[in-house]
Image (tube, rainbow, N blue to C red):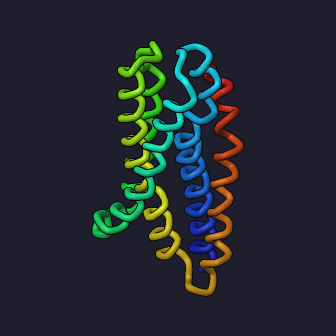
Amino acid sequence: HRERKRKRLVVVFGLVLSYSWYYVCRLSLTYAAPAIVREEGLDLRRLGAILSCGQISIGFSKILSSVLTADLSPSRCLVVGLLLTAGCNVLASLAPGDGATKLVLILAGLWALNGLFQGLGSPSCARIISAWCSAKERGFFWSLWNVSNNLGGALAPLMVGLGA
């Protein structure tokens, strides 16, 4: 019983860390926006359209992911989604910059894919918390996991600043 409690804390701590990185990958383009506008000549209207592609994609993906991955390992879905969203971030940083339509289309496509992969995170975490925590405990552990939103939100500008 004691060993299971320790393992559960490790699992929830791992979920907090991993989902924090989902948030870093979700917010990175937002925090890189001033540099992109300044260095690539991309206007705010186009940048807003790119960011919207990601947000719309995340919304659809959370619904689809929870249904399509119901029979898959939530741990694997969590890791694969995080690796794919990180890959989208790396590719976005390498996109050829000229402020033109080509750059906008590349970034919009990558950010839509990023959003699609982002949708694997939350349903996977929900399934893992449900498996490891009794109904009475879920509220407490769910609130611990929810810290990942704030942690990722705090890390994102720092990580973008380090990479700039």
Which quadrant is the C terminus positioned in?
A: top right
Q: Nearer the viewer, residue 121 or 26?
A: 26
User: Does 13 sit left or right of 60 as displayed?
Assistant: right
Residue that appears at 61% across and 56% down: 16
Whether residue 135 is visible, yes or no, is yes
Spot occupied by residue 28 in the image (x, y as percentages of width and height): 57, 35
Residue 24 vertical position relative to residue 139 in the rendered view, above or below: above
Name the residue at 36% across, 28% down: 105
> Image quadrant for the N terminus?
bottom right
The percent coordinates of residue 152 (x first, y second) are: 64, 46
Q: For the point 37% across and 55% down, which residue is it?
A: 76
The image quadrant that residue 37 belongs to is top right
Q: Is residue 79 visible?
A: no
Q: Is residue 7 positioned above or below 89 on the image? A: below
Q: Nearer the viewer, residue 82 or 117?
A: 117
Q: Quadrant of residue 112?
A: top left
Please state which of residues 27 and 7 is positioned toward the viewer in this rendering: 27
Residue 100 in picture, x, y percent from top left: 42, 17
- The residue sitting at the front extreme is 45
**108 left or right, relative to 12:** left
